[in-house]
């Protein structure tokens, strides 16, 4: 059994909220916006899960770095949807907070792992 991982668990719960958000945006005619936030918001958790079975520390860093890019892209789409009036303030505040926390955790994970390679 795997030990608990806040990064894995938080990214999974965040992905669920992104799926729920996209289902609430069914009336959004800009299909590309829905597709993009769904893709980036769920990919970061999938990449974190994939990194659990990385073949090396370098592979782990690579997968986590891509997850970080996806989290940053999700931040962009969330801001765009909010600034365009498609997400209400309280929903935006909750999602952007979670996204920012995931970004911080991913940055820390990548930095710590890189530092362990240099040691």
Image: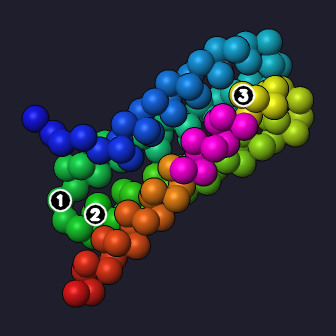
Instruction: Identify the main secondary structure in magenta.
Output: helix
Instruction: Locate residue 79: give its quadrant.
Output: top right
For the residue labelled by badge 3, is the local secondary structure a helix, a strand or a loop?
helix
Rendered position, 101 above or below 21: below
Q: Residue furthest left?
A: 1
Residue 118 drawn at (x, y percent): 27, 86
Residue under the point 37% across and 57% down: 63
Residue contact at pointers 1 and 2, CB within 8 angstroms: yes
Q: Pinpoint residue 89: horizontal percent, then vertical percent.
A: 81, 31
Decide which of tag 2 and tag 3 comes sooner along the chain.
Answer: 2
Q: Which residue is mark 3?
A: 91
Reading the image, the residue beneath label 1 is 55
Start-end of magenta stretch? 93-101
Q: Which residue occupies the foreground of this view, 26 or 96?
A: 96
| Helix, strand or loop status at disc 1 | loop
Mark number displayed over residue 116: none
Up-down relation of residue 118 to residue 106 (above or below) = below
Graded by Cα atoms within 10 Å as few (under 14), some (14 to 19) or many (20 or more), the crowding at tag 1 reads few
Q: Which residue is mark 2?
A: 59
Relative to 40, is 115 on the left or the right?
Answer: left
For the N terminus, which image quadrant? top left
**Label 3: few (<14), some or many (≥20) within 10 Å?**
few
- From what the image shows, is residue 22 above or below residue 82? above
**Quadrant of the image occupied by residue 105:** bottom left
Quadrant of the snapshot with the C terminus: bottom left
Q: Is residue 64 visible?
A: yes
Q: How many marks?
A: 3
């Amino acid at each position: 059994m795997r030990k608990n991982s806040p990064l894995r668990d938080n990214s999974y719960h965040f992905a669920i909220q992104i799926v729920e958000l996209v289902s609430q945006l069914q009336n959004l005619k800009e299909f590309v916006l829905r597709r993009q936030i769904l893709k980036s918001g769920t990919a970061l958790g999938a990449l974190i899960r994939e990194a659990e079975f990385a073949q090396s520390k370098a592979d782990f860093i690579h997968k986590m770095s891509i997850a970080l890019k996806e989290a940053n892209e999700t931040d962009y789409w969330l801001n765009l949807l909010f600034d365009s009036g498609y997400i209400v303030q309280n929903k935006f505040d909750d999602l952007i907070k979670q996204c920012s926390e995931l970004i911080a955790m991913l940055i820390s994970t990548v930095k710590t792992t890189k530092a362990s390679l240099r040691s």
